Structure formats: C-alpha cells, structure tokens
Amino acid sequence: MTTQSLSQSQARRIALAAQGFLDPRPAVPTMRTFQRTLGRTGVLQVDSVNVLQRAHFMPLYSRMGPYDVDLLRRAAEKRPRRVVEYWAHVQAFMPVELWPFMRFRMDAFRVRRGKWTVIDNSPELEASLIAEIRDRGPATSRDLDDGLPRTKEQWGWNWSNTRHVLDYLYSAGELAIAGRNGQFEVLYDLPERVIPPEVLARPTPTPDDAHVELVRRAARSHGVATARCLQDYYRMHIDQVRPAIATLVESGELLPVSIEGWKRPGYLHRDARLPRRVGARALLSPFDPVVWERERTERLFDFHYRIEIYTPAHKRVHGYYVLPFLLGERIVARVDLKADRRTGRLLVKAAHAEPSAPPDTAAELGAELRQLAGWLGLDEVVVEPRGDLAARLAV
C-alpha cells in the first residue's frame, strides 16, 4: 500500500475542517446547528473554572459564534436528551448514543472501585443513596450528605464519603448526571430517568467493538491523527487503540499517511476534507479539542502551549487563563482573558503575538474580543499593557 504524504499545511486544514471551522457561523444558531457542531467535536470537556466562561460552552462559541447557552442545557436536561455527561475525554458532555459504548469503561471503574480514590466496600451506603434518589428524584451530594467527616487528602478536594460513593456509582453507570444546579453542583439520578429508553436498551458492545467505535469517532473529529492523538481523544489505553486502528485500516476507513514534521505514522479518515483554505477567526478555550493534545498542537501549528492556571503567578509566562487565537489556518496570538462580571468588563490581562502573526492580527483579534464581550453580556473591553500585542489592539 502506497502511503500518502501530507504537508503540515494540508494536515492543519484537514484537522480544522474536521473540527467544524469550515461551517459558516449562522445568524441565529439553532438546535440543528448545535447538533452539527457537536457532531464535529464529539465531546465537550467540562471544567469548573469560570474566570471567563465555563469550558463546555466555549468550543460551541468558537465554531457557531454568539449563541444562546440554553441550547446546551436543553440538549442535556430536556427530552429528548441529546447529550449526557460522562467520563468520555475527562468529565465531558458526549452524544447520548455513546452510553452503551462506555459500558466497558463503567465495568472497569466498577472493578477498580472508583476513578481516583478506591471506594471501600459500602453496599449499605450505595443501596441507601440509590434508594433515596429513586424516591426523591435528582439530587446533589449536599442534598444527600450524611454529615460524615470530610478530608482534604485528594488534590485539595473536600469530599465527604457520600460524594465519593456517588462519584463511584456514576462512574460505574449505576447513576447518571441529570444536570447541574446554579452552583454548578452535579444532580445525580437513575440512568433510566436520564438516558432515553431506546439507548439504554441497546445491547452492550464487546470491549473490542467499543474501542473501534471510539477510535472511529476520534479519527472523524481529528481528520488526520497519530495513534497518540487517537488515544487521547477518548482517553483510551494504547493497547486498546492499536488493534482498533488495525481494524479500521484493514476496512479502509483509515488510510496510513506520513505528515511533514511528524515522526510518528499518521492516519487519515477516508471521509476527511482537505479544503483549499480555512477562513477561521476564533478564540479557543484551553480545553478546546483543537489544542487538547499539546504535541499535536505543536506539530500542526508550531504553537507551544501550556495551561498556567496551576503555575504560581510570578512564574507564568503568558497568564492565568490564556486562549489561543486562530486566524485562517494558523494560531497567531494568545490572550489572557477574564470576565469581570461585577463591572461589566472583559479584561485582556495580556496579549502576545506569535512570530508568524500577519499584520491584521490586532484588528481581527480586537473584533473577536468585542464579539466575545457581547456574547458574555459585558459592556466594555479593557486591554491591560502586558504583551507585545496589547498596544495595537483596537477594541
């Protein structure tokens, strides 16, 4: 079999097309727009940081433009449910039809007795929590907390025994997430009251079949990828990914390729588009699928990117919550942003240009910042004098 060769630019355009950056931004995004966009990204990572906007809302904005965030709430909490939270990438919204394909992961969490913390055998507490949720409906950990002592041994969290067991039951598929309250707390419920009955009743795929389906979806969302990229998308083990890749190569769904500047073999999805150009203009969340896998980001865009949230302030290079700025097919700048909701201002704490930034970077970024501020309900964009691009931003 002859291996196709792709330039870095071709791979970049394929990747952006697969992620939905060829779709024109609609005047008024609808549920159909939402579903099309989710079909491109596959998952929406959930994160509690709210310095700008919750992580799961941002990839939709980057592709659809200003939209009513109630679209996601309706898709996740109203019938017919289109998405559900699960440990898909990390904690993430995923299409609800993926639930059966995650049962192999639920089984693994059940055997391990949890994701991070091993839950001691506590059948009485598990049974009582499930029974109470069955009787009272969706409930948070605080609603159900028995007041047992909390600890701060795990990553600084302050979780009670109740919360640990609820998280275990959710990971194992015994409970599902029905939504979140105004404090962003998880509302747990029975799977049969969250997952559509026709989805819940579907046969459980074999682990091998589930692995193939997840790699297939990762390949569609990436367009072109290495095994490591495909492994990261749904956070799989490489031993699960390699046989799945072989199956998809044998069927012709994945085509082996070599990519300029990439040492590892690549795989092109047979339905991937290679556009002549990409005319994107978007701010990317630190949790956007385009920049999830840092090595991939560097190979595609010549863009070295690290999240500095957990870096001490005096050691940060670019800022606390830094968003890459995509213009055309390149990442040309990065901005440290904060939504000051009390004063109605979007604060640009720092703005840095990349070496390849074109002359119109400042103007295009300024326009995107104004649009972002409007979507967030902020009245003003304030640029602080930090970074080599800050003085040129016209907002």
Image (cartoon, rainbow, N blue to C red):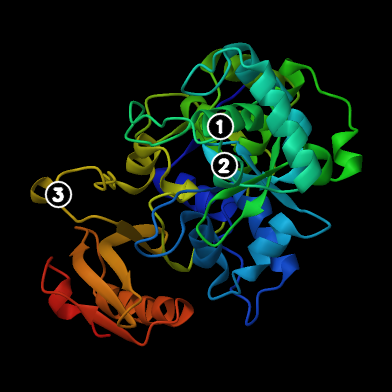
Q: Quadrant of residue 347?
A: bottom left
Amino acid type, mark 2: Ser
Dot 3 alpha-carbon crowd within 10 angstroms: few under 14, some 14 to 19, many 20 or more: few
Q: Quadrant of residue 263?
A: top left
Q: Earlier in the sequence, mark 1 or mark 2?
A: 2
Alpha carbon separation for disc pair 1 and 3: 37 Å
- Please tell me which residue lies in front, 13 or 380: 380
| Residue at the bottom extreme, as displayed | 379
Q: Position of residue 324 (x, y in %)?
A: 33, 58
Label 3 near label 1: C-beta < 8 Å?
no
Amino acid type, mark 1: Thr
Q: Which mark is residue 141?
A: 2
Dot 1: element: helix
Label 2 near label 3: C-beta < 8 Å?
no
Dot 3: element: loop
Dot 1 alpha-carbon crowd within 10 angstroms: few under 14, some 14 to 19, many 20 or more: many
Q: In the figure, is residue 229 to the left or right of 252? A: left
Q: Earlier in the sequence, mark 3 or mark 2?
A: 2
Q: In the figure, is residue 98 to the left or right of 147? A: right
Q: Which mark is residue 162?
A: 1
In the depicted structure, whether residue 306 falls above or below residue 374: above
Label 2 near label 1: C-beta < 8 Å?
yes
Say which residue label 3 marks: 316
Q: Nearer the viewer, mark 1 or mark 3?
A: 1
| Residue at the left extreme, as displayed | 314
In the depicted structure, whether residue 160 falls above or below residue 287: above
